[in-house]
Amino acid sequence: MTLHAIPEPESSAVSSVVDQQVVAELLARAAGQGVSVTGAGTASKRRDGLNIAGGLVNIMVGNGQAPTTFNNNSQHGIYVFGTGVINITGFPLTVPAPNGQGTVVASGNAFAGLRIFEAPAAAGMSTINGFVAWQNAQNGLRLYGGEKVKVRNSVFLANVLNGVYVTGYDASAAGNDLSQIDLGSVSDAGRNVLQASVGSMPDLAGLCVGMSPGRGLLTLSARGNVFAGPTDCTTSTAGIVRSAVCGGFVDLGVVSASGTTVNVDVAGCQ
C-alpha cells in the first residue's frame, strides 16, 4: 500500500501525509511489508515519513517480501524521539554491490533516512538490522550520545553528507556517552556498509563522529564494517581513510574537539 501526501487543513495537527497511527497500524497489519510512505509535507510544512514519539514500532520485512519504503519525504524518512523505540529487520541487496534496494528502505528524503534523537536514558534499545538509507539529502543515519542503539547488516551509501553521523546530545557527560551505541562489537561484527569508493555511490564521509569538548576519552564500537574498496573490516587489516573533518569521501571522520579524544574501534582495519 502506498501512502501519498494529501493537502493539510490549515488548523490540523495531523501529518500532511497520513495520521501516524494509521502508518503504525498498517505496518502491524501487514507484518511490516508492502507499506510505502512517500511525499510527506512540503518545503514550507515539512513532515517525516514515519514519526515515533513513544512506544515501540517493529518493521520486519523478510527476503522476498514486498519492500516497505519511506522515500522522498520533506523531512526525515523515519524520525524517532521522546521515548520511542524502533526495531527494523530487513534484507538489503548487496550482491554484486549495494544499489539502494532492500526490503526496508529510506531514500531521497530531505533530511536523514533515519534519525534517532533522544535524551540520555530516555528510551530503551533500538535495533536496526538490514536497513537501507540511500541518497538522502543529509545523513543516512543520525545518532546522539547517550542513546541505546544497535546497528547491523545495513547499508548507508550515496547520502549527501554522512553515511552515519554521531554527535553529542548536549555538552554533558551523559549526552556524550558512546558506550551504548553499538555499530559492531568483538563478538558480533557490524557488517554495515558505511562507505564506497568514488564512482560507486559514496557518502561525503562514511562514519562521522563529532563530540563535545572537554569529555576526555570516548570509545565508539564499530567493529567489522565495510568501508570503501570495499574493505571488509571483519577480516581485513588494511588501512581506511581517516580525517579530522567529515568530507572528501573519507571512510572515517572524527572532528577535533579540545579536551576530547574519540577512539573509533574498527577492529583489524588500520
Image (spheres, grey):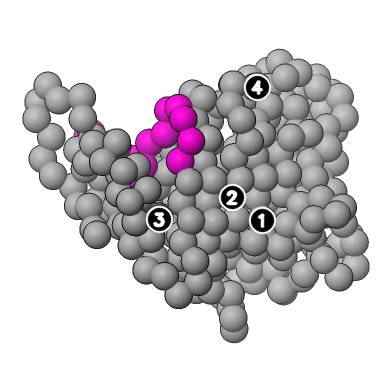
- Quadrant of the snapshot with the C terminus: bottom right
Query: Range of the magenta residues?
Result: 44-57
Between marks 1 and 3, how big is the CA–CA gap? 21 Å
Circles 2 and 4: CB atoms closer than 8 Å:
no
**Residue 165, image x and y in percent?**
61, 43
Question: Taking 261 as reference, is 134 above or below it?
Answer: below
Tag shown at residue 124? none
Circles 1 and 2: CB atoms closer than 8 Å:
yes
Q: Is residue 10 left or right of residue 198?
A: left
Between marks 4 and 1, how big is the CA–CA gap? 21 Å
Q: Which residue corresponds to mark 3?
A: 31
Query: In what element is the residue under mark 2?
Result: strand
Query: In what element is the residue under mark 3?
Result: loop
> How many residues crowd mark 1 within 10 Å: few (<14), some (14–19), many (20+)?
many
Q: Is residue 259 left or right of residue 119?
A: right
Between marks 1 and 2, how big is the CA–CA gap? 6 Å
Question: Taking 238 as reference, is 192 above or below it?
Answer: above
> How many residues crowd mark 2 within 10 Å: few (<14), some (14–19), many (20+)?
many
Circle 2: residue type: Ile
Residue at left 67%, top 45%? 150
Tag shown at residue 121? 4
Q: Is residue 183 left or right of residue 98?
A: right
Choose the circle earlier in sequence order: 1 or 2.
2
Q: Which residue corresponds to mark 1?
A: 152
**Residue 24, image x and y in percent?**
34, 42
